[in-house]
Image (spheres, rainbow, N blue to C red):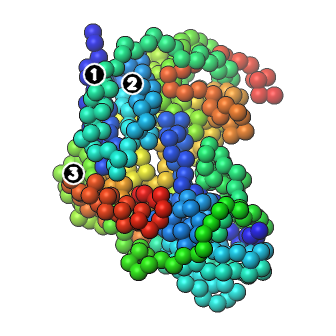
């Protein structure tokens, strides 16, 4: 059993999410950074998609009331066990009574804590992922807080693993996302089309699992566009009338009424989970033939390490 | 008159948008689009099939299918699509308490339409509506066109919180809030029915393609 001593800024239980329900208004949710989540589980000896803890920005303190193995991956949060520094992107043994503390995220937004065997969490619509706006999934449909106790599951697992050299993703406060045009790209005026790919943006304080409101050069449509509500995806960049774009994340609305300018390519979607308030966000244009090649290379690289994983 | 063939457009690297070029709401397009969405959902290659008023977004696995092949698959499906069945889907009656504390924007609608409250209620509840799309949040249903006299723009700045079950108007659209949520629609009434209930066996009361009928009810409904 794991006891939450402090929930921190926002910590939730996530797994691979619940895709396939967007037509009912249910976003896929799941780990915002799918890659670091999968690496944490892999290091802990789990299947890549076992329920784990996602800690946004930091501040999470946990006490382990039984000996087990855990693994850390994602944003650097200066983790300590009983006051001793422990390494990010590694698995470690914890004893009964040990206390894990995470400080404040430095070079990303979210850290993942996987526990050997995974967490024991009832599934809702086929997933253990927490979806806060509708208060379902995960631990009572909410963020973790002081006094919560999490049970460890007995799923089959392997011995803890060490990440081979070259597989640790480099995270920073400057996020570069490769993108293709989305449905209303053509409606943007020419300066806006140029700005999107040359000017950096900054993630505002309005950044969470639903989306990130960006600040930077104003992005405008050439004409006033009256749109009916239309589908959105994680990684869609919407442009509201005030010209400050909104990047949709894993818990984002399934539909929206603003022009859709860009769509981040699938191979880069995991990076959206590492956008913190204040991060610099830049977009790079991807040409037609590139995304399948990038995806194939990334899938064979990480899929070769982590059984069953794909971006 | 037949419906103009939709445009098939690429959306990012692993989604296709099927876009019908219609201004406002069209019952014929809705029927066709809904039939197409159901046909596509039965095909296993799509990870998501999301219908809306005038388009369908189909997400696929780029490592299993190329963008060109995905477009072709949709093209083939469109060519082979059978006649749209004349169905109303499930017909669901929605009891609504109009006006007062349950419909804070009734006064604005009365003013802009020049109608009395009972005329607004008769107009709004006097026709059936189709469920065109679900979302943006669980349970929210976007319905077909409201009578012209009741059409009213949404708030420029959304309210911080609109209670679940609120029945609203935004332009020609009408809909019901599935959860307590911020929102900018003009609220004219509320239903005690839960459109989405995580504790119920049938999580959702409806899906796109169903038909709704508003039944004006007394305040006693909420006691």
Chain under numbered label 1: B
Residue drawn at point x = 41 percent, y = 70 percent: A279
Expressed as whole percent of the image width and height from the top left, the position of residue A248 reads: 43, 52
Chain under numbered label 2: B
Expressed as whole percent of the image width and height from the top left, the position of residue A73 reads: 53, 73
> For numbered disc 2, what is the local secondary structure?
helix
Task: Look at the picture and state if A64 lies above or below A185.
Answer: below
Residue B33 visible in the shown view: yes
Expressed as whole percent of the image width and height from the top left, the position of residue B165 reads: 64, 32
Q: Which residue is mark 1?
A: B79
The quarter of the picture where the N terminus of chain A appears is bottom right
Q: CA distance from mark 2 to mark 1?
A: 11 Å
A233 left or right of A295 in image: right
Q: Which residue is mark 3?
A: A288
Q: CA distance from mark 2 to mark 3?
A: 27 Å
Q: CA distance from mark 3 to mark 1?
A: 26 Å
The number of callouts visible is 3
B130 left or right of A180 in image: right
Of the numbered discs in the image, which one, if any, rests on residue B36? 2
Residue B115 visible in the shown view: no
């Amino acid at each position: 059993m794991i006891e939450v001593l402090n929930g921190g800024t926002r910590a939730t239980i996530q797994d691979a999410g619940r895709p396939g329900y967007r037509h009912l208004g249910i976003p896929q949710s799941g780990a915002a950074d799918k890659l670091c989540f999968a690496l944490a589980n892999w290091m802990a000896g789990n299947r890549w998609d076992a329920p784990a803890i996602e800690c946004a920005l930091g501040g999470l303190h946990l006490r382990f009331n039984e000996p087990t193995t855990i693994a850390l991956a994602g944003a650097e949060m200066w983790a300590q066990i009983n006051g001793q520094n422990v390494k990010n992107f590694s698995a470690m043994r914890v004893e009964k009574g040990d206390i894990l503390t995470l400080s404040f995220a430095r070079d990303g937004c979210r850290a993942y804590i996987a526990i050997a065997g995974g967490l024991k969490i009832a599934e809702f619509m086929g997933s253990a992922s927490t979806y806060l706006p509708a208060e379902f999934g995960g631990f009572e449909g909410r963020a973790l807080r002081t006094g919560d106790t999490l049970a460890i599951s007995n799923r089959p697992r392997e011995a803890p693993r060490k990440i081979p050299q070259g597989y640790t993703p480099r995270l920073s406060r400057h996020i570069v996302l490769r993108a293709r045009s989305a449905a209303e790209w053509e409606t943007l005026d020419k300066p806006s089309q140029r700005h999107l790919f040359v000017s950096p943006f900054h993630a505002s304080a309005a950044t969470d699992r639903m989306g990130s409101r960006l600040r930077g050069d104003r992005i405008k449509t050439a004409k006033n566009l009256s749109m009916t509500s239309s589908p959105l995806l994680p990684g869609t960049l919407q442009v509201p009338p005030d010209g400050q774009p909104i990047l949709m994340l894993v818990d984002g609305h399934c539909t929206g009424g603003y022009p859709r300018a860009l769509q981040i390519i699938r191979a880069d979607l995991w990076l959206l989970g590492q956008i913190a308030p204040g991060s610099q966000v830049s977009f790079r244009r991807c040409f037609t033939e590139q995304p399948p090649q990038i995806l194939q290379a990334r899938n064979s690289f990480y899929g070769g390490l982590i059984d069953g994983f794909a971006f | 008159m037949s419906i103009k063939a939709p445009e098939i457009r690429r959306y990012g690297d692993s989604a296709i948008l099927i876009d019908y070029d219609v201004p406002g709401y069209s019952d014929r397009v809705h029927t066709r689009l809904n039939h197409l969405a159901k046909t596509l959902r039965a095909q296993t290659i799509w990870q998501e099939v999301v219908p809306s008023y005038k388009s369908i977004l189909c997400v696929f696995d780029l490592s299993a299918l190329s963008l060109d092949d995905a477009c072709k698959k949709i093209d083939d499906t469109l060519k082979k699509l059978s006649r749209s069945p004349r169905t109303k889907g499930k017909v669901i009656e929605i009891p609504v308490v109009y006006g007062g504390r349950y419909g804070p924007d009734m006064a604005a609608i009365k003013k802009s339409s020049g109608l009395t409250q009972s005329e607004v209620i008769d107009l709004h509840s006097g026709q059936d509506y189709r469920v065109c799309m679900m979302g943006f949040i669980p349970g929210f249903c976007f319905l077909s066109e409201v009578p012209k006299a009741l059409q009213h723009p949404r708030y420029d700045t959304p309210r911080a919180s609109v209670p679940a079950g609120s029945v609203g108007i935004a332009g020609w659209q009408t809909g019901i809030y599935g959860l307590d949520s911020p929102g900018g629609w003009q609220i004219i009434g509320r239903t005690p029915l839960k459109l989405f209930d995580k504790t119920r066996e049938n999580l959702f009361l409806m899906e796109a393609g169903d038909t709704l009928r508003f039944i004006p009810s007394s305040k006693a409904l909420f006691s």
